Image (tube, rainbow, N blue to C red):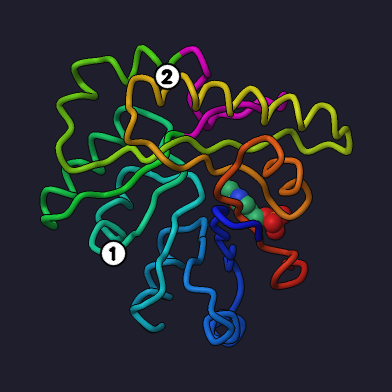
Amino acid sequence: MPPGVILVAVSKTKGDKAILEALDAGQEVFGENRVQEMTEKWERLPKKIQWHMIGHVQRNKVKYMAPFVALVHGVDSMRLLKELDKQGKRFKRTIDCLLQIHIAEEESKFGFDSEEIIPLVRSEDFTNLTHVRIRGLMGMATFTDDKAQIRKEFKGLKSLYDRVKEILPEIDILSMGMSDDYEIAIEEGSNMVRIGSRIFGPRQ
Ligand SMILES: *Cc1c(COP(=O)(O)O)cnc(C)c1O
């Protein structure tokens, strides 16, 4: 990875052996997309691993990961933020979060629309949160071979990130890029990439 870009090794569906090999090689940040699988891995694997939740989170699962999760990438509603805040309070810690933005052409239930973000971060509901810390934004490009399309979507997310940073100068993470598009993402300003199959091989 170029300096300044954090690699999240996406270990979903992968067993302990593959994770321990990567850990041995110096990789300490891992990403999972299911709370239960991540929690089980956290319980039995070395505690120096930083676990990132990269998938969609149901509110009733937040309590299981609240004690240990290092970063929640997929925050896509105020209700979820409020639950993360509540559980952060309960476990006496601040939970780092990214707001997930819907940038792809595909229809998806997940992610905020770009236009929602500026009003959200200015809202009273948002400024009242005490036990979550917004570290930045996350997005996934359209699943396509059209490189120009992917680049356009990443550019759009970077410019939204820059606008949010004018309001929240402390944000420092732009999570974009996966195995097939991370090079474009980094060219467009990503500083955190989530890579699974390029590291661990194809998933079943
Ligand atoms: C699975 C997943 C990845 C990694 O995908 P690869 O194509 O295997 O690199 C990245 N981000 C999210 C949100 C994922 O669910």
Horizontal arrangement in the rendering, residue 59 relative to residue 151 (left or right): left
**Can you tell me whether the CB of the residue at mark 1 lies under 8 Å from the nearest atom of ligand 1?**
no
Quick one: quadrant of the C terminus? bottom right
Where does the image place residue 40, in percent across and percent down from the top left? 39, 74
Please tell me the numbered disc located at residue 68: 1
Residue at the (32%, 21%) spot, across then down? 121
The tag earlier along the polypeptide, 1 or 2, is 1
Q: CA distance from mark 1 to mark 2?
A: 27 Å
Element assignment for label 1: loop
User: Looking at the picture, which amino acid does disc 2 mark?
Assistant: Ile
Horizontal arrangement in the rendering, residue 58 relative to residue 95 (left or right): right
Question: Residue 52 lies in what quarter of the image?
Answer: bottom left
Quick one: quadrant of the N terminus? bottom right
Residue at the (83%, 36%) spot, across then down? 144
Residue at the (59%, 86%) spot, across then down? 21
Q: Which residue is mark 2?
A: 117
**Are the residues flagged by discs 1 and 2 in contact, CB closer than 8 Å?**
no
Residue at the (74%, 24%) spot, across then down? 152
Above or below for 85 versus 10: above
Question: Residue 106 lies in what quarter of the image?
Answer: top right
User: Looking at the picture, which amino acid does disc 1 mark?
Assistant: Phe
| Residue in the foreground of this view, choosing between 35 and 176 | 176
Above or below for 117 versus 46: above
Where does the image place residue 108, in percent across and percent down from the top left? 61, 29
Where does the image place residue 68, in percent across and percent down from the top left? 28, 64
Please tell me the numbered disc located at residue 54: none
| Residue in the foreground of this view, choosing between 200 and 164 | 164
Horizontal arrangement in the rendering, residue 66 relative to residue 38 (left or right): left
Q: Main secondary structure of the magenta part?
A: loop
What residue span does the magenta drawing correspond to? 100-115
